[in-house]
Image: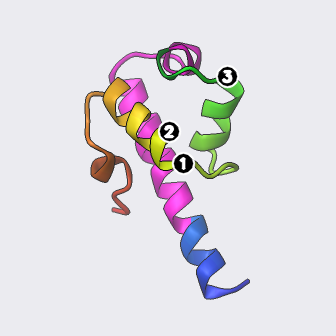
């Protein structure tokens, strides 16, 4: 596994965990969040489990729906 791949994996895992944490604090189901940003529930599941990468547009839509800013969702710690 290359260093770049390991870094991307770490960012995806942190991002997914941050999305899930914010979503559960907001008392939203994956389906609720998916409807808010115009995607399928399965895509939210893939994001939260770090199986899918996301675009800047999706990061922004998630941040707005979760009442936060993109940088907080991307925070590694």
Q: Is residue 30 magenta?
A: yes
- The front one of 31 and 63 is 63
Task: Provide the secondary structure element on which disc 2 rests.
Answer: helix
Kindly check if marks 2 and 1 are in contact, taking CB atoms under 8 A apart as contact: yes
Where 7 sits versus 17, above or below?
below
- Left or right of residue 20: residue 60: left
Q: Which residue is mark 2?
A: 58
- Residue 70 placed where, x, y %? 32, 46
**Residue 27 in picture, x, y percent from top left:** 39, 16
Task: Give the CA distance from mark 2 to mark 3.
Answer: 12 Å
Name which residue lies at 65% across and 76% down. 5
**Residue 30 percent location from the top left of the image:** 56, 21
Which is nearer the N-term, disc 3 or disc 1?
3
Q: Residue at horizontal 60%, vertical 32%?
A: 44
The answer to whether residue 59 is above or below residue 43 is below
SS under mark 3: loop
- SS for callout 1: loop
* Residue to which mark 3 is pinned: 40
Range of magenta residues: 10-35
Residue tagged 1: 55
Question: Is the residue 61 above or below the residue 7 in the image?
Answer: above
């Amino acid at each position: 596994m290359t260093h770049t791949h390991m870094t991307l994996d770490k960012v995806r895992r942190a991002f997914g965990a941050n999305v899930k944490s914010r979503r559960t604090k907001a008392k939203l189901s994956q389906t609720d969040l998916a409807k808010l940003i115009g995607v399928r529930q399965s895509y939210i599941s893939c994001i939260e489990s770090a199986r899918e990468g996301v675009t800047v547009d999706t990061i922004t839509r998630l941040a707005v729906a979760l009442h936060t800013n993109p940088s907080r969702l991307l925070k590694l710690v």
